[in-house]
Every structure is written in structure tokens, then in C-alpha cells.
Image (tube, rainbow, N blue to C red):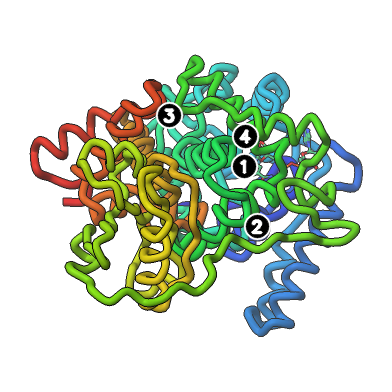
Amino acid sequence: MAALDRSAPVAVIGCGAMGQGIAQVAAQAGHPVLLLDSRPGAAAGAVQGIARALGKLVEKGKLAAGERDAVAARLTPASGTADLGDAALVVEAIVEDLAVKQAVFREVEAVVRPDAILVSNTSSLPITAIASALQRPERFAGMHFFNPAPLMALVEVIRGIATDSTVAETLFDTARAWGKAPVHARSTPGFIVNRVARPFYAEALRLLQEGAGSPATLDAVMRDSGGFRMGPFELMDLIGHDVNFAVTGSVHRAYFGDPRFQPSLVQQELVEAGRLGRKTGQGFYRYAPDPEIPLPHTAEPCPAPRGVEGDLASSRLVVDGVTLALTDGRSATRRAAEEGIADLVLFDLALDYTTTPRVAIAAADQASPDALRTAVGYFQAQGKKVSVLDDAPGLVVMRTVAMLANEAADAVLHGVASAADVDTAMTKGVNYPLGPLAWAGRIGLGRVAGVLDALASTYGEDRYRTSALIRRRVSGGTTFHG
Ligand code: NAI
């Protein structure tokens, strides 16, 4: 399959944040673009908005002035659906409402050419359900861009039950020709990113609820040790708790109440309080009138230990008689009891122990106060800051990455997308430092399964059940990436 010809006209319906961005991407790729919006003046306003965005690119030296004029000249406001008759591709980015989207596509289908491809940018509605209103659902698919569309590389190309595979391939190749990183996905709730990312927020909310650490501490650990660009609490504050809570709720309902996607009372309370995040001046953190972002917990200096047996790479070492071990999903207290060691301190997963500036640790309830000081001193002697957490099973980074990998594995198991595409979606769509499945391979799938099993046995919740595909890979001695 080939991408759409660059001279093929593209129509964008709905000229809000997403439609405007998508129109800019298509015009910069060389397509003549028609813009349509039901709000009077919105399409013309979007053309001006794109011209301003292009102007900023010229100022930053990212676009030649001549190119800006050529791109701007490809944009034309349309006055009604009847104007879209020549479009080879129609991208819809209107209000997120099934009945309204179906009505728009019925109108579109009545005027476009027989070979036109119709797509929706919906982030939550089933592609199959939108398509059911069409005479020819086989030429309909999802093309899910991320905000802001000109900057975010990922495009999820979503197939409904009736979508023709050649249509999906054409969209994939077209997205790639537009400079994007496309992935294929089957229409299932949340598609790839909005499903697989749920544990990033959900486990942090659980850890907060259980008093493992403050939002600032958990964020710092996820950023510094996990290598995530933003911590979960600051990211939820940025997205808006109303939006994030609604997405979690919709995925939870769509999976018939699967406890893996259960929304959080902590987040619900913020929504009820109107603390929606940055946009209202307060969420987990306060932004206005006087910004207040608390510091993460960072341990005071402790003396460097004298005797060290083993190293971090071996996941277990003994420092001045205190055992330090990488979390295996059990709490330090449970593990100390099961292994018969009182002075046990667990440390969290880090993306890279040589470069991580921070390590999170937790001591067993049985451990002496000196054991914690010894552990802090050891990591400080390695040049790390240390955040001491309460003894939460799986700690922060390990627990989150294990749950992300578990969800990613189930998405692969259920035929939503390939392992490679799931990992691409999470690195390109939400900037994770590694795809969850590649990361799980690096940690060791057996270890990831062990963490999940320990969480499941500790909490007794179906939420932590291990994906059958992870079990199969562990049994077969294979990974997700060859
Ligand atoms: P928006 O509210 O900024 O823009 C929607 C635009 O559609 C408005 O200009 C509105 O006047 C127009 N519109 C509404 N009904 C219409 C109709 N019947 N015919 C023509 N125009 C109509 O919304 P936004 O954020 O751009 O979202 C649009 C779509 O993209 C939704 O389906 C949303 O779920 C999806 N999406 C949104 C993302 C985001 O981060 N905002 C990310 C990815 C997808």
C-alpha cells in the first residue's frame, strides 16, 4: 500500500485544538486542506491560527518563510459538507459524542467520492460503533493523534470490525509520510496508550492512598529513578483531574468493571473539590495565587558504610551486616519475616543505577533504626540522593513498570497491537523512557511475574493478576522482542 498522494485533498472537520493541529500537519506534508466547523468563523479562525503557528516556526528557524507562505496557501475554510466532494481523506475531530459523529459521517458519506477514506480522531469512542452508521464501514477507521498534533509523533491507526486492511495500511503509510510514528491497533477501549498508561496514574494514586510517600516524593522517584519525563502527580495536574478521572472511568466501564482500571477515591475527591490541577490553580500541588511545590523527601547525610559485600548489579548486597535487596514485590516486612532476616532494606528499580541521581528505599518493620541509616549511607556514598518510603509492596518504579508491562502484555495477548507497536506507542505517545515490554525484558520477565504475583498475594486482588502472555513467555524462556 502506498501513502495518499501529496496532492490529494484532505478535509478536516472540527477546528478545535486537535483539528487545527492535524490540518497543519497535513498542509505541511503538501496536501491541500479544507477546514470545516459548525461554529461560524471557526474554520477561518483556524486558518489564521495555523498561519500564526507557522510564523512561530519561521521565527525559531524551523521553517523557511517561503515554505510558510506555501503551506498557508494550501489551507481553505469550507462553508459546508457539500464542499468536501473532492476530498481523498476526511479527518473528523469534532465533539466527543457518538450520535453527533455518526450524523456528521452520514452527511459526509453522501457527498464524497467512492474511494475517499473517512477517519475519526476520537480518543474514546469505538471505531466500530461510529462506523455502524455508514453505508460503507470498510473505508472508515480511527486516526488518533496526540495533543499537540504538530509536535507529538504518535498516530494510532485504529481498525474497526469492518475496516478494510488496505485502508488501514494507506493511513499508516500516509501518517509516516507526514513525519509521524504510526502504529496499528484494533478498536478496543482506550486503544493502546489510554489503556496501557492507566497503571502509571493508578499505582501512584494507590501508593499515595497507602501513605507510601508524598506526591512530591513519588514524583521525584518516578522522574529521577524511573527516567519518566514527569511524575504521575504533576502529570495528572497538567492533564486535569476531571479529564484523567473521566478517561479512567470510561476505560473501567468499557472493560465491564475490571479492577485493573478501578478509578481512585483520591482523584474523585479532587474533582469534587474543584481542584482540577493547573487550570484551576490547585490539584495535588498549588500553582496560584502563590505556587507551592513541596520538596521530595531526601534523607539527611549518613556515614558511609565500611564493609560492602556484593554490588547493586546483583540485586542483593550486605552492607555492614544490613541486607539491601531489590524489591521483588513483597514488602520488606513480609520478606524479612519469610527470609528470617531482621535488618532488611529494599531498594526500588532504577532505569540505570549508574546514572540515577536518586534511589527510593524502605526498611522492614523488624529492622533496627541503624539499618536504615546504613542503607542511606551506602547509596549516598554512591553519589545518590535517597528517598525513604513507607514499606509499600513493590515500591514505586518497580510496581508501576510491572503493571504497565502487564497491561501491555494483555493488549498484545488480546490482539490489540503487536509488542513492537505497543512499545512505540508508549515511547512516542507519552514519552516513556522505554517501552514497557522492552523494559520488562530488561528487568527479566520472571522477575516481573514474581513482582505481580507478590502484589496479588499481598492484596488478594484480581487487579494484580499476571497476564497469561507473561506467564507463557517466562515458561518458554522467550521475551516480547525476539
Ligand atoms: P475542541 O472542543 O477543541 O474542538 C472541537 C471543534 O469541533 C470545535 O471547534 C467545535 O465547534 C467543532 N464541532 C463540534 N461539533 C461539530 C459538528 N457537528 N460539525 C462540525 N464541527 C463541530 O475539541 P478537541 O480537543 O480538538 O477534540 C476533538 C476530538 O479529538 C474529540 O473527539 C477528542 O476526543 C479527540 N481528541 C482530543 C485530544 C485532546 O487532547 N484534546 C487528543 C486526541 C483526540
User: Which circle marks residue 91 in the picture?
Assistant: 1
| 3D distance between C-alphas at marks 1 and 4 | 13 Å
Label 4 belongs to which residue?
Answer: 112
User: Which circle marks residue 32 in the picture?
Assistant: 2
- Residue shown at 38%/70% (left/top)? 379
* Front tag of 4 and 3: 3
Instruction: Inspect the image, locate mark 2, and give the three-letter code of the amino acid beneath it.
Output: Pro
- Name the foreground residue: 243 vs 120: 243
User: Which circle marks residue 163 in the picture?
Assistant: 3
Element at label 2: loop
| 3D distance between C-alphas at marks 1 and 2 | 13 Å
Q: Earlier in the sequence, mark 3 or mark 2?
A: 2
Mark 1 CB in 8 Å range of ligand 1?
no
| 3D distance between C-alphas at marks 4 and 2 | 16 Å
Q: Position of residue 238 (x, y in %)?
A: 69, 52
- Is there any visible trace of residue 179 in the rendered image? no
Q: Earlier in the sequence, mark 3 or mark 1?
A: 1
Q: Position of residue 220 (x, y in %)?
A: 55, 60
Instruction: Inspect the image, locate mark 1, and give the three-letter code of the amino acid beneath it.
Output: Val
Q: Position of residue 179 (x, y in %)?
A: 49, 63
- Is there any visible trace of residue 216 in the rendered image? yes
| 3D distance between C-alphas at marks 3 and 1 | 15 Å
Instruction: Inspect the image, locate mark 4, and give the three-letter code of the amino acid beneath it.
Output: Val
* Front tag of 1 and 2: 1
Give neighbour class at mark 4: few <14, some 14-19, many 20+ (Cα, 10 Å).
Answer: many
Mark 3–mark 1 CB contact (< 8 Å) = no
Give neighbour class at mark 1: few <14, some 14-19, many 20+ (Cα, 10 Å).
Answer: many
Give neighbour class at mark 3: few <14, some 14-19, many 20+ (Cα, 10 Å).
Answer: many
